[in-house]
Image: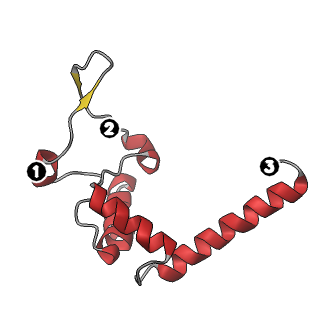
């Protein structure tokens, strides 16, 4: 069972099994395969020198996932309800909770 692994492995596996695979996002991963590494865009600094990728293993939930444009559009379409997915109900609940949070903040004057 994947929840008995070390936390980083749980995050990677959960993300793949719960989100990437159901949505068909085959180019989105935390740990890139050699094929995906070969397609990764190289970053540059202000002087246009190439720079290393940022790897934040302790903050994986804050930016460790790497995706291509096609997968990002797939995720967006699923979130907006433009396509039917196994995650449609969960995504709708998430957006509904966010809307209620924003309304509550607005009504309390802290918006």
Q: Which residue is mark 3?
A: 111
Identity of the residue furthest to the top in this view: 47
Q: Residues within 10 Å of mark 3 (few under 14, many from 20)?
A: few
Count of numbered circles on the image? 3
Secondary structure beneath dot 1 equals helix
Mark whose residue sits in front, 2 or 3? 3
Mark whose residue sits in front, 1 or 3? 3
In this rendered view, identify the residue nearer to me: 103 or 62: 103
Residue 34 - label: 1
Question: 88 left or right of 68?
Answer: right
Q: CA distance from mark 1 to mark 2?
A: 16 Å
Q: CA distance from mark 1 to mark 3?
A: 45 Å
Residue at position x 29%, y 56% from top?
69
Q: Residues within 10 Å of mark 1 (few under 14, many from 20)?
A: few
Identity of the residue furthest to the right in this view: 108
Q: Quadrant of residue 51?
A: top left
Q: Which residue is mark 2?
A: 55
Q: Is residue 49 above or below residue 57?
A: above
Q: Earlier in the sequence, mark 2 or mark 3?
A: 2
Q: Is residue 51 above or below residue 80?
A: above
- Is residue 43 visible in the rendered image? The answer is yes
In this rendered view, identify the residue nearer to me: 22 or 68: 68
- Is residue 1 visible in the rendered image? The answer is no
Question: 68 left or right of 97?
Answer: left
Q: Is residue 55 above or below residue 75?
A: above
Question: 51 left or right of 37?
Answer: right
In this rendered view, identify the residue nearer to me: 33 or 27: 27
Q: CA distance from mark 2 to mark 3?
A: 33 Å
Q: Earlier in the sequence, mark 1 or mark 2?
A: 1
Residue at position x 21%, y 40% from top?
41
Q: Position of residue 105 (x, y in %)?
A: 81, 55
């Amino acid at each position: 069972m994947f929840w008995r692994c070390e936390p980083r492995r749980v995050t990677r596996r959960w993300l793949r099994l719960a989100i990437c695979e159901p949505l068909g996002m085959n180019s989105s991963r935390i740990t890139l395969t050699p094929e995906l590494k070969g397609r990764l865009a190289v970053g540059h600094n202000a002087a246009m020198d190439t720079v290393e990728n940022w790897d934040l293993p302790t903050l994986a939930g804050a930016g460790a996932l790497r995706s291509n444009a096609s997968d990002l559009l797939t995720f967006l379409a699923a979130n907006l309800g433009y396509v039917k997915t196994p995650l449609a109900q969960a995504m709708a609940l998430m957006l509904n909770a966010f809307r209620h949070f924003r309304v509550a903040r607005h009504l309390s004057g802290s918006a």
